Structures are given as C-alpha cells and as structure tokens.
Amino acid sequence: MTNYMDKSQQPILGNDVDPKTPQAGQWRASLWKFLLFSALGIALFIIPFQWEGKVTILLGVLTDTLQAALGGFVVYITMAIVTISCVGALAVKVFKPNLLEESLIKNLFDVDWFWLTTRLLGMVFVWMIYLQVGPEFIINRNTGGVIFEDLIPILIPLFFFAILSLPFLTDFGLMEFLGTLASKIFVKLFKLPGRSAVDAMSSWFGAASIGLLVTMQQYDKSFYSQREAAIIATTFSVTSIAFTYVVAKTIGVDNNFVYFYLAIALTGFIAAIIMPRIPPLSMKPDTYHSGKSMLDEGIPAGYTTYQWAVNRAVTRAHSMPSLGYVFKRSVGNLFDIYFGLIPVIFAIGTIGLGLAEYTPVFNWLATPLVPLLEWLQIPEAAKAAPAMIMGFADMYLPALVGKSIESEMTRFIVGAVSITQIIYMSEVGALILKSNIKLNILELFIIFIIRTLISLLVITSVAHLLY
C-alpha cells in the first residue's frame, strides 16, 4: 500500500471525487489508523484459533475470562440490571420527567407500553427464579434456569467486550474496504451491500448476537435499508463455530463434526440465496432509518476496485472522532443493550422454554412436519419433528431433546437444522424485536419455518450420503 501514501498519487487519493478524503500527511496517518484499528477488530471478532482444546476467537477468550472472574457475582449483576431496567422505565412512564431528546436516561428508560410490560415480566421472572418462588413453568431448571444460569452469564461479559470493541470492526474503515471488494458478489448472490460481508464473518466466527449487533448498528446509521437489515439479521446471524461444536457434542455427532459443519455451511449458503428473493423478506421496503441512505458502493471512473476500497477506508478512518468520544458512545450502547435486552430475554425466553417443557404446543406445531420427515426417510420422525420446532424458543433445545433419539442420522439432521434455523427467541429473536429493524414475531416465525424446510432438504440429502 506504500504507493497510496505517495503525495504524487493524487488521483488515487480521490481529490476530484470525494472532498472528505485526507491529503498528504493526513492520508498517511489515516491509513495507519485504518490498518491498526481494523486489524484489532479482525483479531477480536473474526480470526479463529485453538484455545484450550476448542476453536474460538479472541473475543471468546476475553468473554470466558471475565465470566470466570465474575463467577457467582454475575447473578447479582443480572438481577440489578433487570430491576433497574424495569423500575427506571416505570418511573419515567409515571412521573414523565422533562428529558432532553438525546439524553442517556431518555434512551434507556423512555419505552412504550409493550416494552415496559416486557421489562416488568422479566423482572418478575428473575426474582421468582432467584428466590425459587412461583410456578414450575417459570422457575424450573429447564425453563427459567436455562436463561438465568446458562445463557445470561455468557451474554453479560460477551456484550461488555463486544459493544465496547465493536467500533474497531465497523467504524475505522474495514466495512468500507471489504464492502467495496465484495459489493458485486453480495449484490448478485444475496441482494445485499458488500459491507454485509463483515456481518457474516463476525457471526460465523464469533457469535450470532455479535453479527446482529453489527447489523443493528449499521441500520441505525442508515448504511442498510430496512429490507437489507432484515435479510442480514435473519440470514447471516449464524451461531459461531465454537457453539456449533457444542451442539454437535451434545447431540452425539461430534465424531462427524467436519461433515456436520460442511452441511451447515452449504445450507447457509443456499438459504442466503433463496431467502432474500421470497416473502416476507422480499416485501420489506428499501427505506432507511434516517430517511436516506448513507451508503455509496459505486466505483468512480479511473479507479480499480482495490484502489477505491483503500480510498473509502482511509476516508472513513479520517472522519472518525477521538477514541474518548467513541468509548463514551459505546458505553451508552452497552447500557442500552443491558437494560433493553436482558429483561426481554428473560421474559420471552422463559415463556418459550416453559411452553416447550410443560405444554404440548410444540408437538401440535410439529404435527404437519412429521409426514415430511417420513417422506424424506428420516428415522424416528415423530421424535425429531418437535425437537426441530423447539428451535424457535432456543437454539440449544433441539440438541437437549434430540440427544435421546437412537438414530445417529436423525440426530445429525436435528442438530444441523437447529444451527441453520437461526431464529430463536431466547436471544436472536429477542434482539431483533428490540431493534429498529421492524420484524414482528409472526414474520420471524414464518422465516423460521421457511429456513427449517430449506435446511431439511439440504441437510437430509447430506445425511443420506453420509449414513
């Protein structure tokens, strides 16, 4: 890239195309700013490596370390977050204080009645689970206990590091650089901007919630339209390699993990081509959160794709404010996620797990699926169908239920389908509903069913070849 730091290379610097492009010494400084901070973002979110016998990313190591350091104290942090979230929202709703439009208090606690009710439910549930008082539907280890003891202790440290370090991935030029390079491929295959490649990578190698946080942020900044954000959130928010292995091990097919993962990758690719072209995603409007698009992935005449990718990345890095301002904004986003999402996960996730554990709802919903599984020659179809539908409540439920199935081929299919369904209400679904992307729970369920059908056809074909 040294030729891009040469002052004589003025056409590449883009003087005649973008007046915001830095010049001379500023160009050199902005180039290093882009390279160093983006490299840090890639190291944190994307590069996988072996750590203590598992494939993970640096963000995962930091999360595990903080989780271990917090230990049992995370219980009290959780209860404080959920309680403050509800009490603060109630106080704002009742007393109606005169808050500045952009104040942190208004952003955190000024919510409509639906989200206030959800926060109230979340607070009631968390205290019931902690005190072990109330119906088993809520407080049982397999319902509210899963959220309180298994999921939230991971999400609190994960969100802490993810939100604070997310700007390195999204705001210092990496999105512009990779987006420009991948724009033609992503537009043709997935009907998406090239910068969504970063969302896909951060999900695939990091975690579904990380990719979704990137998508939400980019939509709020009007880099994605509502249609594009909806597609990315429901198509590329795939769970990480590490969690995929956990599912494979739980359901007893880790001996075939390579084929398991390849089947998931193939299914994800096929679904990503199909889903944007059919309802409900194809019917979402190309409107932007701010009213107009902030994205331009066109390449001016006289530039190669690579030259323009570097130009846009350096320009973006140059336009970023101080690290202090970025950190302050990220802290606000962190509190927004904690107070806005954690109570929602408790409310929606606990109810979903309760329905799975104590009612025949998922058996009823799975009834039409049984003939399809039998037609696909999947053994123990009657046991497999409910396990697959349970994935809408929580991604880990199919593995927990499916591990009792005797047929290894069926367990392989159930486990792989649970990963490629993507939409599960205990985390991803709750995060989407909390966002500004405007997907309702009915649309999420329809997307879940369509992805399940696509996944079944592809993964079953692979399973029949393997078994």
Image (cartoon, rainbow, N blue to C red):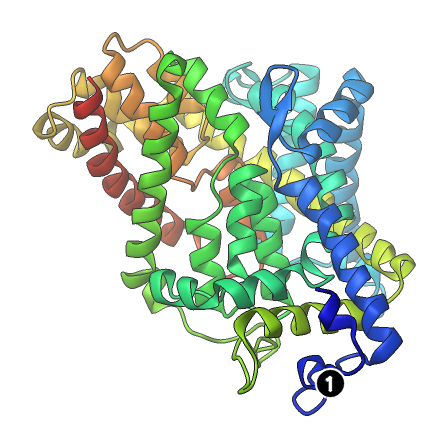
User: What residue is shown at x 17% (from left), y 24% (from top)?
Assistant: 464
User: What residue is shown at x 64% (from left), y 16% (from top)?
Assistant: 133
Residue that lies at the very extreme toward the bottom in this rendered image: 16
Question: Quick check: 139 left or right of 160?
Answer: left
Q: Which of 269 and 313 is in front in this view?
A: 313
Question: Quick check: 455 left or right of 18?
Answer: left
Q: Nearer the viewer, residue 195 or 378?
A: 195
Residue 308 seen from this side = yes
User: What residue is shown at x 25% (from left), y 7% (from top)?
Assistant: 406
Residue 295 % position (x, y):
58, 75
Q: Nearer the viewer, residue 411 or 194?
A: 194
Residue 83 % position (x, y):
76, 36
With respect to residue 23, does 58 lie above or below?
above
Location of residue 155 by image quarter:
top right
Residue 109 seen from this side = no
Location of residue 297 by image quarter:
bottom right
Residue 50 % position (x, y):
61, 23
Total count of labels: 1
Please name the amino acid that badge 1 sits on.
Gln
Label 1, residues with CA under 10 Å away: few <14, some 14-19, many ≥20:
some
Q: Quadrant of the N terminus?
A: bottom right
Residue that lies at the very extreme toward the left in this rendered image: 375
Residue 80 % position (x, y):
80, 33
Instruction: List the residue tagged with mark 1.
Output: 10
User: What residue is shown at x 86% (from left), y 74% (from top)?
Assistant: 26
| Helix, strand or loop under label 1 | helix
With respect to residue 209, does 311 lie above or below?
below
Q: In which quarter of the image is the C terminus?
A: top left
